[in-house]
Image (spheres, grey):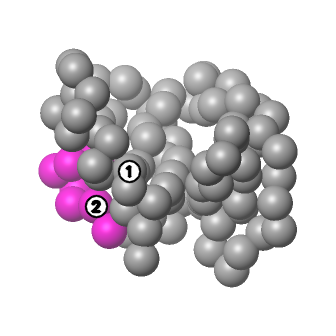
Amino acid sequence: MRDTLILFTSVTHHPTLVARLRGFPRLAAGPHFERYACGGCTFGVDFGQDVLDECDESELSWVAERIGAFRATLIEYPGLGDGMRHRPGTR
């Protein structure tokens, strides 16, 4: 399985995120993710909210306290974790 990242966005900004991600060239959809290409890379996106079932209520409350009502977007990309560790300013 590829690395995954959950992006939490306010309900106000979520449609903008969806439009930007869907602006990439679309590949054949997989069983769980919409597949897109960017340069020589491919990535998957799931806009469904099922991923929230895997989060603790305390985590979701923490997010809601900071950004209010929100939506989740699941991104999967090979080597995502490795790239995140090497970028300045990321945790």
Q: Quadrant of residue 11?
A: top right
Q: Is residue 75 above or below residue 8?
A: below
Q: Upstream in the sequence, badge 1 or badge 2?
A: 2
Q: CA distance from mark 1 to mark 2?
A: 20 Å
Q: Position of residue 38 (x, y in %)?
A: 68, 41
- Please name the predominant secondary structure of the magenta segment in the image: helix
Q: Is residue 68 above or below residue 80?
A: above
User: Looking at the image, which residue is at 44% across and 41% down?
Assistant: 7
Q: Quadrant of residue 52?
A: bottom left
Residue hosting label 1? 80
User: Looking at the image, which residue is at 69% across and 25% down?
Assistant: 16
- Residue 3 seen by the camera: yes
Q: Amino acid at mark 1?
A: Leu
Return the residue nearer the eye: 75 or 67.
Answer: 75
Q: What range of the chain is rendered magenta?
A: 54-60
User: Looking at the image, which residue is at 60% across and 23% down?
Assistant: 12
Crowding around mark 1 (Cα neighbors within 10 Å: few <14, some 14 to 19, many 20+) is some
Q: Is residue 34 left or right of residue 58?
A: right
Q: Position of residue 67 (x, y in %)?
A: 37, 24
Q: Is residue 30 above or below residue 41?
A: below
Marker disc for residue 41: none
Residue 64 on the magenta segment: no
**Closer to the observer: label 1 or label 2?**
1
Residue 58 on the magenta segment: yes
Residue hosting label 2? 55
